Amino acid sequence: MKKIYLSLFLGLAYLTGFSQFSLIDTETGLPAASSYTINVELGSPTVSHDFEIHNDYSTQKTIKVKRYLYNYVGTQEIYYCFGVNCYGFVPDAAFVPAQTSNIGAGGMLPNGQGTFGLKTDFDDYGNLGNARVLYVLYDVNNVNDSIAVEMNYAVSAVGIAKLDAKNFSISNPMPNPATSNVSVKYNFSSTPKSALVKIYNMVGNLVKEIKVEGTEGKTQLDVSSLNDGIYFYALVVNDKLISTKKLIVSK
């Protein structure tokens, strides 16, 4: 499930005020916002957003896309499609593929099956935390003729889909709120290759990680070094997220 909040000023979608092409949000049919914030529930399917590129000029334009990566967490994947090409995740701050797309006078992308305008994709791959990416489209013959859209992904544990919950379970913390030590019980139907309890703060940063062994038992979480506040702890088995629960630290 995703929720999208458009920025307040749709008109700021353009880097320049006189762009001769436009980016259209296919969900609304309106010009793209300058920035999108997308709330992603941890473990959700890939989040995609599609844009059409319209040539509003009387001659053909040759368009290219730059991608700027400002922030991401762990193995989150940020990838996109443009023209007839799709690009897997590249962790470089700036990524500039060589491919271009020609758009005829008054034409648009996508203009047929297998052709994309700009399709942005995001997958959290079980990692809490925010990601921020900027896409800049420009005319290779006039680099000042450009347009940009920023995608902000906020990954939260709220409403997470529980995978294999029948086979692997973990209890609520005791006590909760906690001051120093917390106990949690776990029960697995079989011995996993790996099992971890990971604690995240409210902004998605991993603050503590504890290895879990065997098929059942109790593990102690030392939270004495954590600041007061709300945390989430996640059970990760065989690199798959099973469940998350809320933990409050109050000293």
Image (cartoon, grey):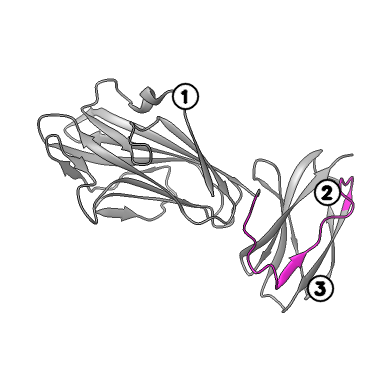
| Residue 243 falls within the magenta-colored stretch | no
Q: What residue type is labelled 3?
A: Glu
Distance between the Cα atoms at labels 2 and 1?
Answer: 40 Å
Q: Which amino acid does label 1 sit on?
A: Leu
**Going from the N terminus, do you reach mark 2 or mark 1 first?**
1
- Residue pointed to by mark 2: 223
Can you tell which quarter of the image residue 54 is in? top left
Name which residue lies at 30% across and 23% down: 16
Q: Quick one: SS at disc 2?
A: loop
- In the picture shown, does residue 15 fall above or below 85? above
Q: Nearer the viewer, residue 107 or 87?
A: 107
| Residue 172 falls within the magenta-colored stretch | yes
Residue range of the region highlighted in magenta in the rendering: 159-181
Image x and y of residue 230, in percent: 76, 42
- Residue pointed to by mark 3: 216
Name which residue lies at 52% across and 46% down: 2
